[in-house]
């Protein structure tokens, strides 16, 4: 961003509210940074400047003191307090790559020490899979596609064109760090930053790999088959080891986490391993008893309605629910009985019901349980 261009509001840059907390700020920055990665934006010459703008916004808003100054006085307040972004001196995107896809973390980008010389694990990836309730009950393999950082197949991760040497970085003399000394009213201050030429490795390829441009890694779409286990619930995650982003300097890859979403089923409500459904029956079936068909996760099945079944009674089919994720048992299917009062009666039906009603006695209408009035009185008494 040129010096003459007015700075945008940092909150607008990250796309967050002014009351966002630390985790929201970090999440917004990482999302932007991944979108602006050079391997994803090879045709956008402004990607690096957009990243620096986002990184500067993160650098300020993630620091409580700087954020307080900015909230109160804006960009002018930061300048008057001596703030200057650490991103203005970037000469390459190697540090961006490190911050996003290695285990070093974003904090190393804000003036910290040089890159670790040892192996570091790659970052994890989260993907989503949507399955039906039947698929969740029986288990199913799902095919997932996602973008991941992988080792470059051309150079096998060393960043050099095959057959060409890797040399000691002439800028940092193989240290991976640059040290500068500045004079202040309080004396000399030494600062250490990651070498912008080798990205902290201390070595650079004499001829960069034509495929990955010397980074040793590329972003490619991956496809993997993941087994969704029987009994999984909505919102649970499946961990696939080693299918995340590639590690740095020989470090292991991160993991893939698959967030499973189970679609709503119009027939069932799930309660743990139990399933709940409802069935409509006539008042005659409720009084006389009947055999009716009800849905189960395995298909339709018969349910015996006992004589004198009351509205909203629950009947249970044992073991006809969802399988347990951590065992061999199954939950139950609970069937709520909805007794439907008939409408639009024909004359002969009305006559039969009137004759039947004349024969009813209080004994016929007694459920043997607490009366509705008794339940209401108990409820109002608290």
Image (cartoon, rainbow, N blue to C red):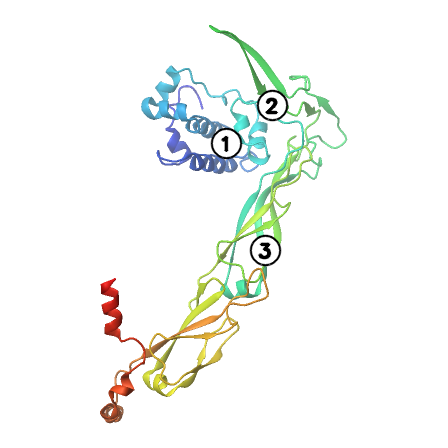
Residue 373 % position (x, y): 23, 73
Residue 251 % position (x, y): 67, 36
Between 338 and 165, the one nearer to me in the picture: 338
Whichever of callouts 2 and 1 sits on the residue coming sooner in the sequence is: 1
Report which residue position mark 2 lands on.
114
Label 3: which secondary element? strand
Between 323 and 110, the one nearer to me in the picture: 323
Whether tag 2 and tag 3 are in contact, CB under 8 A, the answer is no
**Which numbered marker is on residue 47?**
1
Residue 346 % position (x, y): 25, 89
Q: CA distance from mark 2 to mark 3?
A: 39 Å
Q: CA distance from mark 2 to mark 1?
A: 24 Å
214 to 231, vertically: above or below: above
Residue 35 % position (x, y): 50, 38
Report which residue position mark 3 lands on.
143
281 to 205, vertically: above or below: below
């Amino acid at each position: 961003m040129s010096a003459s261009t007015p700075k945008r509001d940092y909150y607008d840059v990250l796309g967050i509210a002014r009351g966002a907390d630390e985790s929201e700020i970090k999440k917004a920055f990482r999302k932007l940074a991944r979108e602006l990665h050079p391997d994803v934006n090879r045709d956008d010459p402004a990607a690096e400047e957009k990243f620096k703008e986002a990184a500067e916004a993160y650098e300020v808003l993630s620091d409580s003191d700087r954020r307080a100054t900015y909230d109160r006085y804006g960009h002018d307040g930061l300048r008057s307090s001596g703030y200057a972004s650490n991103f203005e001196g970037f000469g390459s995107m190697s540090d961006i790559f490190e911050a996003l896809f290695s285990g070093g973390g974003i904090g190393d980008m804000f003036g910290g020490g040089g890159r670790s010389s040892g192996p570091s694990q790659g970052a994890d990836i989260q993907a989503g899979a949507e399955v039906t309730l039947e698929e969740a009950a029986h288990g199913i393999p799902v095919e997932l596609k996602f973008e991941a950082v992988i080792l470059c197949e051309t150079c096998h991760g060393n960043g050099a064109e095959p057959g060409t040497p890797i040399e000691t970085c002439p800028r940092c003399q193989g240290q991976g760090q640059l040290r500068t000394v500045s004079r202040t009213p309080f004396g000399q201050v030494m600062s250490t930053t990651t070498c912008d030429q080798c990205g902290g490795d201390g070595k650079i390829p004499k001829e960069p790999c034509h495929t990955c441009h010397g980074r040793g890694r590329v972003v490619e779409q991956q496809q993997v088959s993941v087994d969704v286990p029987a009994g999984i619930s909505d919102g649970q995650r499946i961990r696939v080891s080693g299918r995340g982003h590639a590690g740095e300097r020989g470090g292991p890859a991160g993991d893939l986490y698959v967030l499973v979403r189970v679609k709503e089923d119009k027939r069932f409500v799930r309660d743990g391993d139990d399933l709940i459904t409802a069935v409509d029956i006539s008042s005659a079936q409720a009084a006389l008893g009947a055999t009716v068909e009800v849905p189960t996760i395995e298909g339709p099945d018969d349910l015996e309605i006992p004589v004198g079944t009351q509205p909203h009674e629950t009947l249970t089919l044992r073991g006809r629910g969802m399988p347990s994720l951590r065992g061999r048992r199954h939950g139950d299917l609970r069937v709520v009985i909805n007794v439907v009062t008939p409408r639009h009666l024909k004359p002969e039906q009305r006559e039969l019901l009137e004759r039947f009603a004349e024969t009813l006695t209080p004994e016929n209408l007694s459920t043997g349980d607490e009366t509705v009035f008794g339940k209401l009185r108990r409820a109002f008494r608290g």
